[in-house]
Amino acid sequence: MGADLDDLFVRAEDGELLLRGTTGRSRRIRNRLASIWMVGSVVVAVIPLALVIGYVLVKGIGQLTPDWFTKDLPAVTRRAGGGMGPAIVGTLLITGVAAAMSVPLGVLGAIYLHEYGGRGRLARLIRFMADVMTGVPSIVMGLFVYTIWTIAHGLSAFGGALALSCLMLPIIIRTTEEMLRLVPDELRQASYALGNRKWRTVVTVVLPAAFGGITSGVMLAVARAAGETAPLVFTIGAARNLNLSIFNGPTTALSVQIFGNAQTPFEAAQARAWGAALTLVAIVFILTILARVVSAGVARRHNA
Amino acid sequence: MAIDQKDMAVTPGDRSGGDAASLLVASSGRRTDRLFRSVALVAGLLVLAILGLIAASTTHEAWPAFRSEGLSFVTSSTWIPAEGKFGALAFIYGTVLSSLLALVLAVPVSLGIALYANEAAPSRIRRPIIYVMDLLAAIPSVVYGLWGFIVLAPFLGPHVYAPINDAVGGWPVIGWFLNGSSGRSFMTAGIILAIMITPIITSLSREVIATVPRAQREAAYGMGATRWEMIRLAVLPWGRGGIVGAIMLGLGRAMGETIAVALVIGSQAGQITTHLFEAGDSMAAVIVNQFGEASGTHRAALVGLGVVLFLVTIIVNVSARSVVARFDRRAQGF
């Protein structure tokens, strides 16, 4: 670092720029170019976001009639009509079951990491592998659940939920641990001083204190899982009718419907894909915004 | 609350050996404690168990394909399911090429946004930039795929790739990468992937940049540095390790991305070419496109592609996390 600053110092002195309190032309131009690059990057990133959201809104909004939410999928893909009811219910059901499995386990895992494991070797290994696990492609999770569940038990909502919960688990562990870290140690010590055992301290003092942050992290994980397609393709099948059973028979989901309908050359099917995309994006955005609101509320309370 | 007080009263007693009833309460408290710890430990160990199970069960399922193909599973590019030939090299190539294209496009943009948000932006538009990144990250990959398939690819082919090809396709070196103007191509896959990994690289780089000590920035400014010189001298050297880690995590994400790539890469099996505007295929895209109609060894081979993908992404992620961890230690130790 010292060498770099020396470099700057020498260069400035050479041109006597600093002494005269002005900045050389080429340095000014380079600084201007860097600013253009930075602002340009933001613009470049906003364009696809605006285009994607715009297209989804414009092309999808026409599909959202009351029938869309209640009717079964049409028997013939290329015809218009029918609705997306089974896929909407499927997405909510599969994501809900996945959350019901991964949230308790993830929070418990985080409690182990932060409250018990700390800086120990095992905890460090688990923490590292949880980070690595967040990078496992979702399609690999789909294949994994296909091999351990679907081959033996057939297509069902539960298979999809298993795959999604494998994706959510490491995210929930890591975000929850971050939130537990924010709980001041004084709270734990106060609880011990009252004679509370560790488990009681964790359950009645630490978890409530971290509740907002954990909720927000969980919602982001759920939002990500709700949009996943690859893990569902091999595990839930493609039903046309509503299937409320978790373990029995194939079901469907919004993401799978988008994927399937997009690839057909039929206009009605593609329109259905846009409608499903709008519905899915709405669900995901609502969850994301709720998570933001919750975490903003928590931040306000902390500052107060 | 009453129970709490009883617990409290009992705790000292359990060392000095109090009456039977209080001993019972105390030891049951301890047992609950131990039970709670064990349950939490099991939940933590689940991560290791799942990773191990993924490796074991998918390898087992793919074994018939691995056995019949041997090493040529990853060295041959002949993939003809009807003849029982499963060489995945072309798909590995497609995965690597589309992901590298995505990095080339996404890294300058991501770093630009991260630097702008942390160093240059007026404070009132900092938040909106972060929100935009959050929204980009929140859009499901299948929605990007849908947009890429119906809107972007049909536009890029005739209106961007073809003119570029006509203009500079005959030039030396550049022409080597051009030729062809397929809307669904390696390049389109790279563009869609770049959009998807930009928020990841941006947010991780931002975290790294935020740890640069204020004194270091002020020292650079104090010596008369312009903003760019300050960034180059004080911010980038400090964050280099973490930024490299962020880029590698983006790479891992791009390689595993399935649905969006499956929709825009063109699904041209067996194509290994330097022509970026031609159709190809990636490992994840082949798995999802062929799985439905596959059976027997073909299906085993597709699971085998998943095993290769798993190994590659694990390697990329482990190295990325190691880089980031080393950076974290340094940042904390400073």
Image (spheres, rainbow, N blue to C red):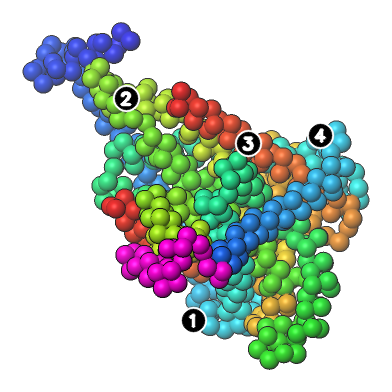
Q: Secondary structure at mark 2?
A: helix
In the rendered structure, which segment of residues is drawn in magenta? A1-27
Q: CA distance from mark 3 to mark 2?
A: 30 Å
* Residue A150 falls within the magenta-colored stretch: no
Q: Is residue B211 above or below residue B239?
A: above
Q: Amino acid at mark 3?
A: Ile
Q: CA distance from mark 1 to mark 3?
A: 49 Å
- Tell me, yes or no, whether the two marked residues, 1 and 3, touch with CB atoms within 8 Å: no
Q: Secondary structure at mark 1?
A: loop
Q: Is residue B180 above or below residue A289?
A: below
- Residue bearing mark 3: A289
Q: Secondary structure at mark 4?
A: helix
- Name the mark on residue A70: 4
Q: Amino acid at mark 1?
A: Leu
Q: CA distance from mark 2 to mark 4?
A: 49 Å
Q: CA distance from mark 1 to mark 2?
A: 58 Å
- Residue bearing mark 2: A187
* Residue A18 falls within the magenta-colored stretch: yes
Say which label, 4 or 3, has the lower sequence index: 4
Magenta region, main secondary structure? helix
Q: Quadrant of residue B114?
A: bottom right
- Residue bearing mark 1: B71
Q: Nearer the viewer, mark 4 or mark 3?
A: 3
